[in-house]
Structure formats: C-alpha cells, structure tokens
Image (cartoon, helix red, strand yellow):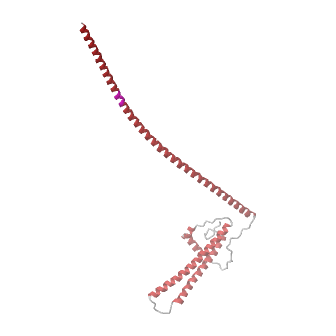
Amino acid sequence: MASSSHDLDVNEYHEEILRHYVRFSREQKTTGLRSFHSAAEDFKTQRLSDEAMMTVNEVSDLLEEFIDILEKEFEQEFTHQYRVNTLLIKQLFQQAEQWFLKLNPNFDQLENRRLIDLIRDYEQQQINTKKSKTNKDMNTIMDPINDTKSTILLKTEIQKLQQLNGSLKQRLSKYEKDDEFLNQQLEEHTRSFSNKEATYTQQIEHNEKRLKDVQQALALAENELEKKFNQTNTYMNMKRIIEQKNQQIKELRQQSAGNNEDEDDD
C-alpha cells in the first residue's frame, strides 16, 4: 500500500475519500453549532424579558431550562452523527463482503491520543492548504473491478476455498463429537473400574479380617484341645499307676497268704 505524504498509511485514492469525509464531518459540525445557536436565540427571545432585575430562583429556573434545551440538542446531533458513522461502516463492510473479506477494525485505536492528534493536524492542514479550485464531486463507493478472466478465476477459487473450509469445519465438528463421545466412554469405564477396585479392596479387607478371626479362633481351640489332652494323659497315667499299685498289693497279699498256709502245714 502506498503511503501518502501526510503519514495516514493509506493510498491516494483512500486519502481522497478521507478528505471528503473530513469535509462532510466539518459541515455536520457547522450545522450542529448552528442548531445550538438557534436554540439559544429562541430561548432568549421567548424566555428572557426586558426586566432589569430577576430573583435568584428565576435565574436558576432559566438556567436549568436552558441546559435542558442544550442537552436535547446535543443528544439529537450526537445521535445523528453516530448513526451516520454506522451507515458508513456498513457500506465498507458490504463492499468487503463482495470480495469475501472480513474486516477487523481496532476499536482501541479510537482512544489513541496520538492518532487522534494526527487526524486533527491533517484536518488543519487541509483547511490551511485549501485549494482555490472546486474539487469535483466524487463517488465514495469503491470502483467496481472489471470481471476479467483473472478476477472471475479468483472469485471461483475463493468460492472453492470457502466450500473446502466449510467441509473441513464439518469434519472437524464430527471429529470433536467423536472425541467427546470417546472421552465420555473412557470416563465411564474409569469410574466403573474405580468402583470395582474399591469394592474388591473392601472385600479383600473383609476377608483378611475374617481370616485373622478364624486363625485366632483356631489357635484358641488348639490351646484348649492341647490343655484337655494334657489333662487326659495325666489322668490316664495316674489311673494306670493306681491299677499297677493295686495289682502289686493283690499279688503281695496272695504271696503272703500262700506263705501262711505253708507254715501251718509244717
């Protein structure tokens, strides 16, 4: 893009459009100021009298009424101005859409003091260097481009790219849905596995506790059984010893009785 001598970073054709818009805005400003002055004159004619003295309350009422009139005039002019600007932006967007372009205005620059001062200086320069000759009327609509073979081919390629882009977007949307479905399935399986793992862990802990209880019961039973077994062996040993003693006593008595009979025979 060719840069102009005024550092607006636009080519000569667009700079001429900017000059036209500056003149148009300046005329709108002049019309708005006339409207303010007219409202003030009407107020003075209708509301101010020839009386030399006025009370404080009367002056206050007049000022409030005058401010209200100016506020309505300002609101009307300001509303008209931003609607005109909106219409201009709409025209630019429509012309861009004819060539499948998407404009991306930077609204942050509207508050850039350096850029605003640049436009102010440019406007002042146009006023100071105003040419004597009358500028011919110009059409602010972008000049149509002849539909040559190259431009027709370019439009055709743009349409093909748009169709391809739409097809890719549809495929991407399908892949995203499939990916979302797979993620949901994975989450469900993960939750199911976690639940089963928690159940198995609880069951194992319960079985280990039961095993410990059974082992403790078996150990206690073994101790009791061994105790009873020991007690039974002691009893049997004593019984056997007693029986042996009784048998020995019986044999001794029999021997003693036999000896006595032999002595009597002698």
Residue at horizontal 41 percent and vertical 39 percent from the top: 213
Q: Is residue 266 left or right of residue 169?
A: left
The correct choice, above or below, for 131 with respect to 157 in the image is below
Residue 156 vs 183, above or below: the answer is: below
Tell whether 246 sits left or right of 137. left
> Which residue is at the far top?
266
- Residue 161 percent location from the top left of the image: 68, 59
Picture coordinates of residue 148, whole percent (x, y): 75, 65
* In-front residue for pair 113/46: 46
Frontmost residue, 73 versus 32:
73
Question: From which residue to which does the magenta span run?
Answer: 227-232
- On screen, 179 above or below 95? above
- The quadrant in which residue 131 appears is bottom right
Residue sitting at x 39%, y 34%: 221
| Quarter of the rendering containing residue 109 | bottom right
Quadrant location of residue 53? bottom left
For the question of whether residue 218 can be seen, the reply is yes
Q: Name the one closer to the observer, 44 or 25.
A: 44
The foreground one among 130 and 43 is 43
Furthest-front residue in view?
A: 265
Image quadrant containing the N terminus? bottom right
